[in-house]
Amino acid sequence: MKQYSQMDKAELSALKSELESAFSKHKEKGKKLNMTRGVPSDDQLALCNDMLTCLTADDYKSANGTDCRNYGGLDGIPEVKKIFADLLELTPDEVIVGGNSSLALMFDNVSVNVSHGVRDGKPWQSQGQVKFLCPSPGYDRHFTICNYFHIDMIPIAMGEDGPDMDEIEKLVSSDPLIKGIWCVPKYSNPTGIVYSDETIKRFAKLKPAAADFRIYWDNAYAIHDLGETKKILNIIRLCEEAGNPNMVYVFSSFSKVSFAGASMTCMASSKSNCEYIKQRLTAQTIGPDKLTHLRHALFFKDAANVMAHMEKHAQILRPKFKLVNDKLESHLSGLGIGTWTKPNGGYFVSFDSLDGLAKRVVALCSEAGVALTPAGATYPNGKDPKDSNIRIAPTFPPLGELEEAMEIFCVAVKLASAEKFLNA
């Protein structure tokens, strides 16, 4: 089939009528298909069902004798600190293990810095209008945190190796009101990009104008490979070597490993940062949910078993990501109306329509019963300058529903594109 840009008005008009008919048939089915968020499927959650019964009435103490039913243990029981440390190639005293939400750890860290400053420095709220750098397209919940605290966001373009480091280095070194940057370094949300070695090295060597600048390294998909395990460089070690030992906070999570609502997450940083954070935690909590920590320790035992478990997740997810790519290839390849990523891990596929069509495509999908992440959500303040990026989240629906959703999605892209060329 011709590219749409090569069709004349008569061809486009005939094509539009054909697509409208196909779209109407999809609408008549009255489907309700949800691809709004990257959440685990029922089959993935079932992989950990034995965790629900692995505790017994006599089995409630951690390896160091801590009674996990009681108060205490601000930074997690030793077993799970070691699991996270081994997965992230760190030491347990560089890891603080919390509850089920890494987002809560990030929010809390930003909140404290706004009100009390970084390590009791000058509070951000008293310094003027502070700013964060936001690689885009990116994770909408990072942007929501900034909005909540009235932090200005500066979009940074993403390339194949990660965000534009020339721009980051220039901005960070020249503006003391830039206090942080959000990063998803492995299988970035939503593009699936993995930061290159050179990109990570340049992050570690940043020379910020603000002494209280911090890198928020959200390594949410550290172990979420679909194929061969892909390792990235250790940002904490590189920052140490570059003379910036306290500049980075690393976040990771088991929310897509075990149970999203009853999981564990961690914040990792320099030993000095961790000691400071633990002192602050004494004013905030008497300790995390150590029984959940113990369940994870008993179920997984060590990092090697965690990685073996992740292969079970990959076996469920591979067919879904393949289906998405196959549908996009068979329906849209060669038409010149869209491009998409083919990630090797993570939870998303990033699709770029023709400029100005993302909102129209999402609206059409909604009419036909397919719920997608709102267009623009992958950019700060929900403002995609090209109105082209759409995040596809294929993990939750069963394969049959995902196939139907992608059929509707492809018809919507083609119909919106035909409309655009006819109105040109």
Image (tube, rainbow, N blue to C red):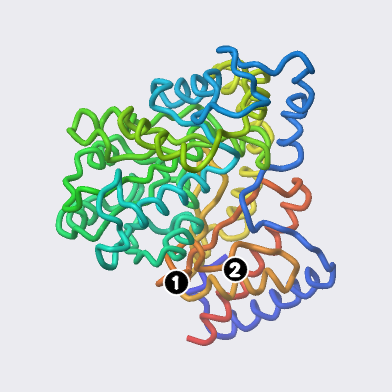
Q: Residue at x 66, y 33 (%)?
A: 258
Across and down, in percent, residue 301 comes to 61, 16
Residue at label 1?
Answer: 383
- Callout 2: 10 Å neighbours few (<14), some, many (20+)? many
- Disc 1 to disc 2, C-alpha distance: 20 Å
Q: Quadrant of the N terminus?
A: bottom right
Label 2 SS: helix
Mark 1 vs mark 2: which is more N-terminal? 1
- Callout 1: 10 Å neighbours few (<14), some, many (20+)? few
Residue at label 2?
Answer: 413
Q: Amino acid at mark 2?
A: Val
In the image, 296 versus 374, the foreground residue is: 296
Q: Are marks 1 and 2 in contact (CB under 8 Å)?
A: no
In the image, 24 versus 136, the foreground residue is: 136
| Occupied quadrant, residue 23 | bottom right
Q: Amino acid at mark 1?
A: Lys
Q: Does 14 sit left or right of 49 as displayed?
A: left
Q: Does 137 sit left or right of 416 as displayed?
A: left
From this view, report whether residue 354 is shown above or below residue 315: below
In the image, 283 versus 405, the foreground residue is: 283
Label 1 SS: loop
Q: Does 195 sit left or right of 67 as displayed?
A: left
Q: Residue at x 41, y 40 (%)?
A: 280
Total numbered labels placed on residues in the image: 2
Q: Residue at x 49, y 36 (%)?
A: 252
From this view, report whether residue 349 is shown above or below residue 344: below
From this view, report whether residue 130 is shown above or below residue 320: below
Across and down, in percent, residue 127 comes to 25, 63
Q: Does 111 sit left or right of 97 as displayed?
A: left
